[in-house]
Image (cartoon, rainbow, N blue to C red):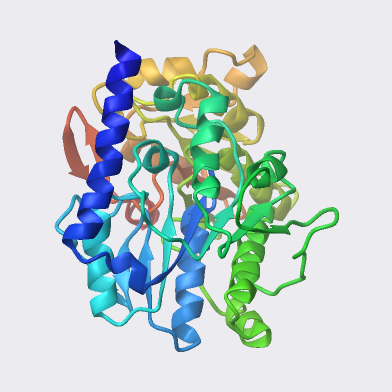
Amino acid sequence: MNNLFKKLKTIWWREKSFLARYCYGNPSSKLKIVGVTGTSGKTTTVTLLYKIALKLGYRAGLVSTVENLANGKPLNSGGNGPGTTPDSVTLTKLFKKMANEGCEYVFMEVSSHAMDQNRVAGINFTGGIFTNLSQDHFDYHKNFENYFEAKKKFFRMLSKDAFALSNTDDKYGLRMLEGIKAHKTTYGLDGKVDFNDRLETKLIGNFNAYNVLAVYAAAVLLGWDKDKVKNVLKTVEPPRGRFEYFNALNGVTVIVDYAHKPDALQKVLDTINKIKKEGNRVISIFGCGGDRDTLKRPIMGKIGAENSDIAIFTSDNPRSEDPEKIIEEMKRDLSVNLLQKVKSISNRREAIAEAVRIAQKGDIIICAGKGHENYQDIKGVKHNFDDMEELKGALK
């Protein structure tokens, strides 16, 4: 009965997508749309592509977790605001507004939920990019294979005229290209790939090296001038809340990042440990979202404790769950030695204040999990909360 209900829902989602395209005059057909899928890096990749397009003189649109834009102008589609991939009606409204603004290109995030729910059915993508795959959204997909298949569904829908650009340094990169119609292209830092150029950028970290390389490769595949793209890449800034940092007057460096899944947290902490100077400490502040994948909680707790000198476990968006219970699940698999490095402060504002209080000159504070979000979801109420503002306020 459950399988039948799911099939009926899938059919309805697909038909809803096609109906939305029909009712609004199929605006996506007037645009060159590049979709980016993967666990991490989607927002950075689409945002950089969008910024480069504008700097090169193209008219372009952006559909991302952080914001929806057309030629620098914020778009309100009448939906529920920015999300990784909006529902099909909201998405079609966005495309129509972008087409009306004269956009030639659109760069958008394509989530596994969007693919499973057929939100992008009927869109003729110019290209697709795969960044990486690691554990996330098991509360929805139940297991890794279902999660992979949702991502792979996007590459299967690409036409033979589209490009499929995949990070083959990721162990799922080659699988993503198997049995698809689109033109297969690869990028990576290791091995034999189509794109492994050395590029200058303001973005920090090995994970961002992959994002920048994907952006450059996609730009070349779109036919943009290689040298101009390289020059613009030297100047573009990362999206808000993606390894966003500043150096405080007391000599402490503060970083805010959206890392809210195990692999992303690991990569961010690896980068910070590489750039910190000997004798300085990494102080991490992070939590795990309520009403979401519970399996990643002890994994993230261990990653944070192992890769920080001091790890402050706190609330992310607890939603309907008890924040103290979430923290206990994060601590579940920690050894006695690792537990000695952990502070548990469920109030996120107090956790940030404690990190600032104990930080000394040269230390690096990383506040992870919420990134660009300017709210905290507690018991169904969204309270104003911005990690960067809180950090700057505490440092004063």
From the viewer's perspective, is residue 328 above or below residue 67?
above
Q: Which quadrant, please, contains the N terminus?
A: top left
Q: Nearer the viewer, residue 346 or 168?
A: 168
Confirm whether residue 87 shows in the render: no
Above or below — where is 360 with respect to 306? below
- Please state the total of marks drawn on the protein image: 0
Task: Give residue 319's position: percent from left, percent from top.
Answer: 26, 28
Q: Residue at x 40, y 36 (%)?
A: 116
Residue 4 locus on image (x, y percent): 31, 17
Nearest the viewer among 303 and 67 is 67
Q: Between 373 and 221, which is closer to the camera in this rendering? A: 221
Q: Is residue 375 visible?
A: yes
Q: Is residue 152 found left or right of 177 in the rendered image?
A: left
| Location of residue 323 by image quarter | top left
* x 56%, y 65%: residue: 161
Quarter in which the C terminus is drawn:
bottom left
280 to the left or right of 34: right
Give me the residue at 50% from left, 41% from top.
Answer: 153
Is 25 or 36 nearer to us in this picture? Answer: 25
- Please name the residue shown 47% across and 43% down the image: 368
The location of residue 138, given as percent across then percent down, is: 46, 25
Residue 17 % position (x, y) = 27, 48
